[in-house]
Image: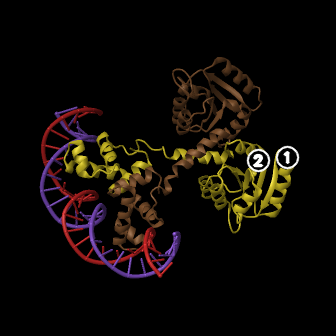
Chain colours: A yellow, B brown, C purple, D red
Amino acid sequence: MNIIIYEDRQNQRQSLELWINNHPQFSVVGAFPNCKNVEAEMHGLKPEIVLMDIDMPEVGGIEGVIRIKELNPDIKILMFTAFEDDDKLFPALEAGADGYLLKTDIDSLFPALKDVHAGGAAMSPGIAKKVLDSFRQQKTSDKKYELTKREREILELLTKGYTYKEISSTCYISMDTVSTHLRHIYAKLHVNCGTAAVAKAIKERII
Amino acid sequence: MNIIIYEDRQNQRQSLELWINNHPQFSVVGAFPNCKNVEAEMHGLKPEIVLMDIDMPEVGGIEGVIRIKELNPDIKILMFTAFEDDDKLFPALEAGADGYLLKTDIDSLFPALKDVHAGGAAMSPGIAKKVLDSFRQQKTSDKKYELTKREREILELLTKGYTYKEISSTCYISMDTVSTHLRHIYAKLHVNCGTAAVAKAIKERII
DNA sequence: AAGAATATCACAGAAACAGGTGATTGTTAG
DNA sequence: CTAACAATCACCTGTTTCTGTGATATTCTT
């Protein structure tokens, strides 16, 4: 399995390379301090897996992931970094990284390399937790604002872009009643216009 | 570490119990064929981790996760099942499972138990891949409507409930310009009012 | 039976918005 | 260079929405 390493600190890069090359199954075919020339390096060295640091001078790891995945999505990229904060994590995953391993988890490096090579994804447990949480975050509140059935109904029509007039004829009530209901809805959601209400309703899965 | 097992097949349940009890660090304090009485069982046996199958008669594993997490979110739940399909996976994660291990990955059971106990999440590589993919899939339609940077910026402010006036002063542009931008945005999104635009923007993860 | 919550309707003024037309200035890509 | 696009501004008109202040009828709870 051919691997390229991107890591700006020279001693880390070299010891990583040595250590990986010691494993019979893996072979480091290149190691670079940043992603300035990823395109050429991918073409020239044809790695199957890229081990990617994030914080690197000139062209960083997240930009590197974007470029590599654009070039060839089949090249697997395992982030290998000290960063655990969302600012780096989610952009990296969105860019298309196949895994995200913390450097403290170096024991899991070989299994992780095998996992991503097999088409799976590898993540440190804490990272996986963050991903799951963000995945769930969408489905949180529920009854918090205690809208009545009618209010929910009208709010839902509002999110569909209906005007007061359309809502009134859909529900067989007058526009003034629609207006009254929406007034109550705004008060309950602590907003003061339709767009904010719709935003809140959708984000918090009220409708 | 005290563990409860939910697994409908008796021989699997028993051999799992034996095997886990053999490990010095873990102790099975209960094993049941379905989730009919989770509430009582949680109260009586006070487990730290629940190992949860999905397909069980009467009350299944996903319903079990919902009930347990409602009762006490601190109890960690590791799904342990043969199902790899999205129909079971995502509902389980949404319900609040802390990990999802395939039965074929039984080698990873003890590390996974330790990971979830430590507050992390554990997933089989293939499962993690699905989660990452779904995570990314949301942020795809980014270019579908081809909004410009400025348009996205203004749309985002609109979703926050800003009025034209507020947007104009936030962006240091005139209200007429805001109006022009929004007109273009509505045209691109094929809507004709702010609420519909906001609804579409959030639902399709444009902002 | 009284009180609370829900759903309905009305009037009215001020503020905000939608849509049409038209124009200028950069920047970018062919 | 020119055409297309992005971003900006202006004016105008009619419509829609927001907000305040009321009122009535029904149902549900205590």
Give the label, 2 or 1, closer to the camera: 1
The residue indicated by pointer 1 is A23
Residue under mark 2: which chain is it in?
A: A
Q: Can residue A163 be seen from the camera position used here?
A: yes
Picture coordinates of residue B59 (x, y %)? 52, 24
Q: CA distance from mark 2 to mark 1?
A: 11 Å
Q: Of residues D30 and B155, which is closer to you in this image?
A: B155
Q: Secondary structure at mark 2?
A: helix
Picture coordinates of residue D8 (x, y %)? 40, 75
Q: Earlier in the sequence, mark 2 or mark 1?
A: 1
Relative horizontal placement of residue A116, taking residue C25 as reference (left or right):
right
Relative horizontal placement of residue B58, taking residue A154 as reference (left or right):
right
Mark 1 packing: few (<14 Cα in 10 Å), some, or many (20+)? few
Picture coordinates of residue A179 (x, y %)? 24, 51
Q: Residue at x 71, y 68 (%)?
A: A57
Picture coordinates of residue A134 (x, y %)? 55, 48
**Image marks 2 and 1: residues in contact by CB distance under 8 Å:** no
Q: Height in image: B36 above or below B132? A: above
The residue indicated by pointer 2 is A109
